Amino acid sequence: MMHRLSLISLFMAVLLSLCFVSCVDEEEFADTPQGNLEALWKIIDEHYCFFDVKQQAYGLDWNQVREKYRVRVDDVMTEAQLFEVLANMLSELRDGHVNLTAAHDYARYWTWYEAFPANYSDSLNRLYMGSDYKIASGLSYRVLDDNIGYIRYESFMSSIGNGNLDEVLMYMMLCQGLIIDIRNNGGGELTNAEKLASRFANESTLVGYYRHKTGPGHSDFSSMEERYLEPSANLRWQKPVVVLTNRHVFSAANEFVMYMKALPKVKIVGDHTGGGAGMPFSSSLPCGWSVRFSAVPMYDAQKQSCEFGIAPDYYVEQTDDDFHRGRDTLIEFARQLLRNS
């Protein structure tokens, strides 16, 4: 029987995997540089969810990583030196959801977007938005001069209500098409991504799968569980839609792109998204530092991992010529695409 996964049931499934997460209680580690490194390595070894994906992509060998970094710690090193070693060890995972947090610093891996073209400009966005655009909670929006609707959603951390969405879509109802710009959206709450995407679905739509950890082995997972996007009971959009993306689209924003790509009237324009397809959890080290890591892997409707991002339907990059002319290449491409629709 097909399993229709709500956010509540996903949360319950995730709680199940938490029984394997907490602090490492099977073995006590000393609050020493070596003890903290061993504790961190074991937490990741038993609970991180993308070892198979990373091994296939670039040959990650977590046992080899342990040997590489354990010789870099000693009992006379400072906290700052230990933090740097542990942060570098975690960076071997190449995962934007993996962080080490101490009172003095926050270790992060941001190469997933920093090493790529921005394909977004605040100054260009201000030219398109003007000063009289409307704001509905986390959404900024206006109708462009060719009767194309434009919505900018900067972060899924900003909540949106059904009343907000009803008002925005009513305002856009005479538009020929709609652009949803989520460039530089680093994620936030999955409920916001699902709430917005549901306004473009007319039937229950398979959008992906998930699994959860069932044991400490790198391949110890449950079978894949289906995830469905249910259509909103409120006002729904029936015209063509373009979603604008760049490499800085991550986590819940990456999930939103996955949802939208499964819908028939939606096209994705811009750059490959940044990824972040693992639901993150946290644990702690003997010294009290907190570590966050990907623990529940998500997959698209073809059962492919989206950890390394999602390809657009149309690759479009911001050109220098357009920038100097005050034109956003991606917005202009989307407008032309919608006019031709």
Image (spheres, grey):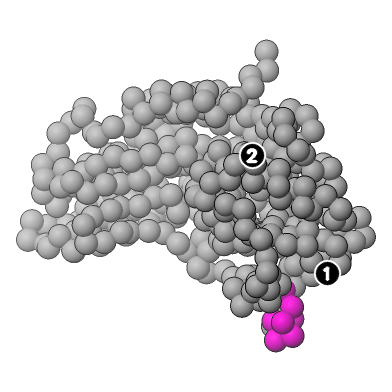
Look at 62% across and 53% down and name the residue there.
136
Q: Secondary structure at mark 1?
A: loop
Relative to 201, residue 144 above or below:
below
Residue situated in front as seen by the camera: 94 or 2: 2
Residue 282, quarter of the rendered image: top left
Residue situated in front as seen by the camera: 257 or 144: 144
Relative to 203, 307 lies left or right: left
Residue furthest right in the image: 340
Q: Which residues are magenta?
A: 322-328
Relative to 335, 191 lies left or right: left
Relative to 94, residue 165 above or below:
above
Look at 21% across and 62% down and name the residue there.
104
Relative to 337, residue 216 above or below:
above
- What's the mark number on residue 181? none
Residue situated in front as seen by the camera: 164 or 95: 164
Measured as percent of width and height from the top left, residue 105 is found at 26, 61
Residue 41, quarter of the rendered image: top left
Relative to 216, 267 lies left or right: right
Amino acid carrying mark 2 in the image: Asn
The residue carrying mark 1 is: 145
Using the numbered discs, state the Cα–Cα distance from disc 1 to disc 2 in whole angstroms: 27 Å
Q: Secondary structure at mark 2?
A: helix
Amino acid carrying mark 1 in the image: Asp
The residue carrying mark 2 is: 162
Kindly indicate whether the residue at mark 2 contacts the one at mark 1 (C-beta within 8 angstroms): no
